[in-house]
Amino acid sequence: METKTKNNYWIKSGFINILQNFSGVFFGFAGFYILVRVLSKQDFGVWTLFMSATTILEAIRSGLIQNALVKYLSAADKSEHSVIISASTAISAVITLACIGIIVAFAPYLSTIWESPQLINLLYLYVLVFTCSGILTQFNAVEQANLKFNGIFINNLIRQSSFFGFVLVCYLVDFQVKLVYLVWVQLVSVVLSTVVAYGFVKHNFKLTFSVSRPWLTKLFGYGKYSFGTSVSSLLSGTVDQMMLGALLSPAASGAFNIAVRITNLIDIPGNAIAVVVFPQSSRRMEEEGKSAVKYLYEKSVGTTLALVLPGVLFLYAFSEYVIHFIAGEKYADSIPLLHVTLLYCLLIPYGRQFGTILDSIGKTRVTFLVVVGTTVVNLGLNYLLIVQYGVMGAAYATLISNVLGFIVAQIILKKEVDVSLWNTIIYMFRFYPEFLEKYILPVWNRKMGRGDHSKI
């Protein structure tokens, strides 16, 4: 019975998170596809800058708050939950106020250097969005810590689909879209999502009248490294495109972006499994020790590789058709870039679960140092190889930095929890017959049994 419950948890939670990640990629790509058609080049450029600035602010707060809350809440006794949530909420409020101060102070400066006067009003209005999204982040973290994901999936779906629905209707009825309308839609969607999220989490979201100083210190001490990791990861994922635009041209950056967008689709299972593994590894570390964490790492990486490998092989075989279908023949130069980016797709599951496992056992400083080191190496290699090889240099640089990061991560994991690289390969190949035996054949047999019974 216990094994069946665990299997149900992994299948149900993993499936929900894969759906969530897929819907995020779908609505993000579909929204981009429509926005470039309903906005002028100038307005779309301003919107891109606006989204870049607000994404960094969201990453700052999420990095400082979310992982720390999930880690300690998932491992703590129920009696301590209200104290932990109250301390985390207090930190979130302070960070939110600080970021609002940054928005108010720097909005005029950013609008000047980017020559976008309307950016000031967009950022000022976003203060309301940012305030509501902070509450939503708290609700989602509490639900994740309690190993529940339905509410997170539903409120994210509402937030993404409502924004996409607005731009789609504008496109279909040929309505002129102003950027301020888009921010108002963001506000409405995040308010709706927050209300829905509260309905799912209200039984677990309890606050106290006093804030525990020890928990403030513990949560912030953990979160500061998670924050550094999040921001470094964000920079690591965009530095190649930014440097291509600076050293070569925006067109070169666009060609590379096409390849990155396609490989992001391959990364959906890894994102989903990381969300499921993090609270589990924190809990098992407290209850069973490092041997359980070792199993979680090897099993989760193997499962992710099993899900990723067919997609990588398919894209390799049909890369030309995929590029032409998504971006058109004018982006044929993205095909060799895609071949290289697909190679480091096979290393991403190792790196993602490395961060998840190290964070869950309290080694956030190590994760932070590895991610920062990889980002610095990536930055240096991009400069050297782009100058030498052009746009392909960015792909080579990212591949090399990922390989180096993979080697360092495996050495650390071997030392900390004695992981075996070979076991991840074994679990990858075991996944296919296990999935067939546990989930496909029983359904098939039940259908065949009903069919035979109907004939009788």
Image: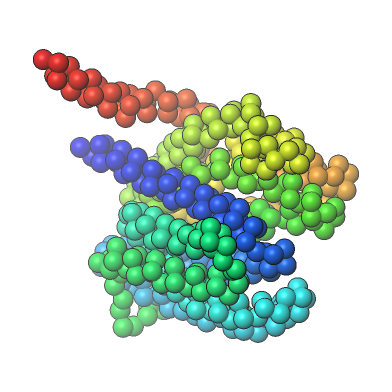
Q: Where is residue 286 in the image (x, y as percent from the top left)?
A: 36, 53
Work out whether residue 68 or residue 100 is closer to the camera in this orientation and state it.
100
Placement of 398 over or under 164, stated as above or below: above
Front residue of 368/456: it is: 456
Q: Closer to the camera, 139 or 117? A: 117
Q: Is residue 216 left or right of residue 311?
A: left
Please state, as top left, top right, bottom left or bottom right, where the N terminus lies in the image.
top left
Drawn side of residue 253 relative to residue 93, left or right: right
Residue lying farthest top? 456
Vertical arrangement, residue 78 with respect to residue 393, above or below: below
Q: Which residue ends up furthest to the left in the rendered image?
A: 456
Point 23% across, 20% down: residue: 448
Is residue 413 in view from this perspective?
no
Tell me which residue sits at (50%, 69%) in the image.
Answer: 186
Expressed as whole percent of the image width and height from the top left, the position of residue 425 reads 52, 28
Task: Report the residue at 55% width, 33% height from top.
Answer: 311
Colouring used for the render: rainbow
Q: In which quarter of the image is residue 170?
A: bottom right
Where in the figure is residue 43, as x and y percent of width and height? 68, 68
Residue 209 seen = yes
Most extreme residue toward the front is: 173
Q: In which quarter of the image is the C terminus?
A: top left
- List x then y, in percent, for residue 65: 48, 68
What residue is shown at x 66% (from left), y 53% (from top)?
237
Q: Quadrant of residue 125?
A: bottom right
Quadrant in the rendering for residue 316: top right
Number of dots carrying numbers: 0
